[in-house]
Image: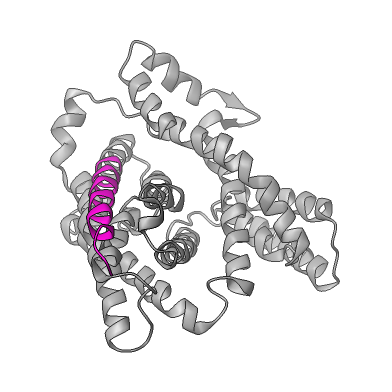
Amino acid sequence: MGAAALALAVANSPAAPAYFGALHIEVLGLSLLDWINDGLMALFFLTVGLEIKRELLGGELSTWRRRALPGLAALGGMAIPALIYAGLNAHDPAALRGWAIPSATDIAFALAVIQLVGKRAPASLKLFLAALAILDDLGAVLIIAVAYTTGLSLPALGLAALTAAVLFAFNRFKVMPLPPYLLVGALLWVCMLKSGVHATIAGVVLAFAIPSGAPLRRLEHRLHPWISYLVLPLFGFANAGLALTAAAVQGALGSVPVGAALGLLIGKPVGVFGAAFAAVKLRLAARPEGANWAQVFAVAMLCGIGFTMSLFIGLLAFTDPALQEEAKLGVLAGSLLSGLFGWCLLRLASARPS
């Protein structure tokens, strides 16, 4: 949060030219912004992949019964925001490429907000949000891999597939030390970067190749501090810098920022809550134990905090800097309002007995 706020302050200060200029300094053929978004964010996706694998194997997503409620809620929470955005931007093919921007939930921000109400929110509600956000991240990864892959290079893609096969062969033959996985994973990242598939997907592929048990837990434990205190703050600082010029303010009511903001603020809670409510009423899943429907709706509102993933998808969706800036504006506005409303609703709902 601090890094994003600092980026906004710097982007609207006399230091703005130096800030934007530094992001485009080239190092080894990539700009600093590319190293952050393609390189460091691959480590973020590696951590996300490790979390997904751990939960699928032995956590909150280990059985179909446990997956049903967060899974269906995640699907609803991805579909409705995308439809809202697409409906508002159907007239413009260039803007329509951003249909997936409001589909993602920022797990770190959402869980941070729910922690603010402390023990008044039942543990089952926090687990529901965590499981939903993890599945949401998995959906976002699939969307990035399928919808935002351009200019495929078949030789590089073939080499990437071969490298991935080596990683899974390590797993199959029970290679337990982490260095061989990390070295081959770095080669996979280079192949992905050259292939046209977004390089961050290499992080997820590597995560699913890491042996479960001690190696997975050890790598996840070692990565978390770096992700929390370096990668995500750097991403926020590099990408949340929005110059609030007269043109940007005039464009605030354009279809791209409004579509992104409404997708997060309205589409997310409607999709998540609607799917969860239907799943419980159809007896496909059970409501989180000890939680009332008002609390579930408040959590659905928190899912509208899209920040990291939504900003990331916005950068992939658009090559036009003006559209990227409009998408940022919509994501920041929608995420901020979703967080504030979600927190207020959660405090009010948690003050009453279930």
The image quarter containing residue 29 is top right
In the picture, which quadrant includes the C terminus? bottom left
Foreground: 199 or 348?
A: 348
Q: Please report the bounds of the magenta region as a residue range.
A: 332-354
Q: Main secondary structure of the magenta part?
A: helix
Instruction: State the residue lying farthest toward the top.
Output: 14
Q: Is residue 323 magenta?
A: no
Foreground: 48 or 33?
A: 48
In the picture, which quadrant includes the N terminus? top left
Q: Is residue 81 visible to the viewer in this orientation of the structure?
A: no
Query: Which scheme is used to colour this image of the protein?
Result: one colour
The image quarter containing residue 239 is top left
User: Residue at left 36%, top 45%?
Assistant: 318
Foreground: 214 or 250?
A: 214
Give percent across and percent down for residue 287: 35, 77
User: Residue at left 45%, top 19%?
Assistant: 21
Q: Is residue 66 visible to the viewer in this orientation of the structure?
A: yes
Give percent across and percent down for residue 241: 37, 29
Foreground: 321 or 124?
A: 124
